[in-house]
């Protein structure tokens, strides 16, 4: 009885080629996944920085507002003059040689001559004097503010020909029977983590 033997068929490399293709596809998918995770982390980090900066700015704006309101109730005539210790300027006119469109901010810093104060996040509604170092909150943000009265010069002002930006509180009434409020601008500078610097401005009357 004779046995027919057949030589084994030679491999043509098809399985190896398919394996290499699958390996390349898996590698590209892994790279894309890693890049997507990095991008998502960066977006989340930026959102966290923005929220922390906004919260610190809100605190500084509120402390500036409270000081301004208390001052207008207790000693309104004092608002006719500058108060460097409280970061207040009775006029919005910049020093000689300074562009009014860049006052009080110059790049990511204050212009020279701006009397700003740190907003203390841990004590009451009063600021830290401008000669002291700023105190950061628990998230590492420090906030300072500067208040400007929107008038061309210091001194007592009246609604008529005052040289000030004022808000008419009773639009429907005649001029003689209308009430006006002075407009103030509050500028806030926030120092945050990773050496970030942000500015916020708010107008109140």
Image (spheres, grey):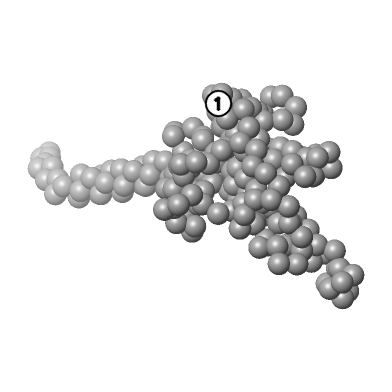
- Name the residue nearer the viewer: 166 or 12: 166
Camera sees residue 51 = no
Location of the C terminus by quadrant is: bottom right
Q: From the viewer's perspective, tell me whether residue 200 is left or right of residue 27.
A: right
Q: Position of residue 64 (x, y in %)?
A: 69, 40
User: Where is residue 63 drawn, in percent x and y?
Assistant: 71, 37
Characterize the local packing of mark 1: few (<14), some (14-19) or many (20 or more) Cα atoms within 10 angstroms. Answer: few
Q: Mark 1 — residue?
A: 131
Q: Residue at x 84, y 73 (%)?
A: 175
Residue 79 % position (x, y): 72, 45
Q: Residue 56 is drawn in which quadrant?
A: top right
**Helix, strand or loop at mark 1:** loop
Establish if 152 lies above or below 90: below
User: Toward which corner of the image does residue 125 lie, by quadrant?
Assistant: top right
Q: Nearer the viewer, residue 129 or 90?
A: 90
Residue 18 left/right relative to 49 = left
- Quadrant assignment, res 33: top left
């Amino acid at each position: 009885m004779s046995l027919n033997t057949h030589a084994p068929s030679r491999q043509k490399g098809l399985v190896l080629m398919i394996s290499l293709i699958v390996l390349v596809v898996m590698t590209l998918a892994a790279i894309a996944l890693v890049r997507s995770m990095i991008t998502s982390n960066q977006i989340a980090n930026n959102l966290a920085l923005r929220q922390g900066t906004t919260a610190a700015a809100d605190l500084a704006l509120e402390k500036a507002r409270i000081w301004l309101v208390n001052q207008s109730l207790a000693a309104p005539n004092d608002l006719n003059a500058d108060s460097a210790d409280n970061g207040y300027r009775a006029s919005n006119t910049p020093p000689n040689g300074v562009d009014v469109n860049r006052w009080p901010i110059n790049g990511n810093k204050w212009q020279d001559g701006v009397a700003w104060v740190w907003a203390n996040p841990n004590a009451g509604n009063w600021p830290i004097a401008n000669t002291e170092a700023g105190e950061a909150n628990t998230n590492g943000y420090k906030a300072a503010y500067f208040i400007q009265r929107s008038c061309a010069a210091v001194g007592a002002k009246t609604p008529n020909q005052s040289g000030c930006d004022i808000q008419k509180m009773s639009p429907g009434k005649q001029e003689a029977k209308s009430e006006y409020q002075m407009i103030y601008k509050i500028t806030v500078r926030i120092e945050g983590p990773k050496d970030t610097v942000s500015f916020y401005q708010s107008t109140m009357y």
